[in-house]
Image (cartoon, rainbow, N blue to C red):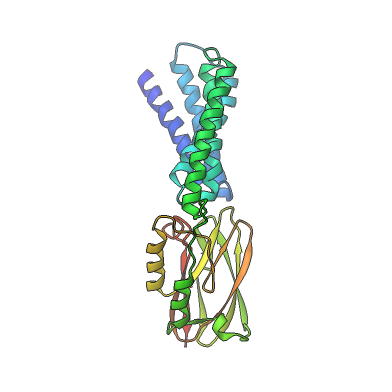
Amino acid sequence: MSFATTHTATLLKYGGISFIAGAVNHGMFSESRSVITAAFGVCFYLIGSWLEMRVQDAERQSWADVLGVGIVSSIGLGFFTGGLQHFPDSPDRSVWVVPLGFGLSLLAMYYMDWRTRMSVNRLITYALFSIAVVSACSALAWSQLTGQAADGHGHSHGELAAQVSTADAHAHASDAGATVATRTVTVTMGDDMRFTPANWQATSGETVRIQLVNTGKVRHEFIIGTETELQAHAEEMKKPNAGHHHHASNALSLGAGESGELIWTFTDAGVLHIACFEPGHYDAGMRGTISVLP
């Protein structure tokens, strides 16, 4: 009975942490699904902690301690592990989630197991040093992943834009000059790593105003081109120090809550592709197609 209870408690505690990490990874509580996932994670962790207390002979912690510290500990560990797992996917979020999670887990562990064995002064010294190290490492990772290192090196879509402007299937509006858009298509970009709509149609010769809205809490981009061009660009973005904040004639990068637009003239029938090349977003499914009808 003791082994079975211990095993169940362990599964519930670590499963709860994984649930919270998943909620951090997939929307940072921005959608009902992630909120529900996080809530289940906290509940699992608390139940596991309660079972663990029953197995142990010592009554070191009261239920009130487990409830309060358990919530802080589960959220802290979930933030820390979830932020680390998806740092390449969402560096703007992970840069602060990782240090926050580390700090919360540190405080929870101290209160749960070390408050009678370690002085507050030693805790403060260790906390300041360790959190500073974690924060510095997070900032360094963020700067490398977003192309905003101190030397200011970045990457633009200039070469790709030149290819796009001469491709047979399409031409961007800068070539059209005074061409007036005949309609507007609004495309939202969310933290579920999806464009909405992801697949839509245009007519050959039509000029469309593509209104872009980032409804998420992390940066997203919209880039348009042929499948070959986008695949080549995806490989380019994997190179060290490749930046990801694009503002070119065929691309627009938007921060959380921002909006913008691209004017695009579709010259020939065919299929164009859209994608987001912020780290990890394309692989997570942030892509789509535009079918250009004759």
Q: Which of 67 and 148 is in front in this view?
A: 148
Judged left or right of residue 271, residue 69 is right
Q: Where is residue 114 in the image (x, y as percent from the top left)?
A: 52, 17
Judged left or right of residue 109, residue 259 is right
Q: Is residue 205 above or below residue 158?
A: below
Q: Is residue 192 above or below residue 289?
A: above
Quarter occupied by the N terminus: top left
Q: Is residue 61 above or below residue 95?
A: above
Q: Which of 15 and 158 is in front in this view?
A: 158
Count of numbered circles in the view: 0
Is residue 61 visible in the rendered structure shown here?
Answer: yes
Residue farthest along the left direction in this orientation: 3
Q: Which residue is drawn at 40% across and 72% down?
A: 229
Q: Which residue is drawn at 55% across and 27% down?
A: 127
Q: Which residue is drawn at 37% across and 23% down?
A: 4
Q: Position of residue 56 (x, y in %)?
A: 44, 15
Residue farthest along the front direction in this orientation: 151
Is residue 1 visible in the rendered structure shown here?
Answer: no
Q: Position of residue 142 (x, y in %)?
A: 50, 48
| Picture quadrant of residue 70 | top right
| Picture quadrant of residue 196 | bottom right
Q: Residue at x 46, y 65 (%)?
A: 287
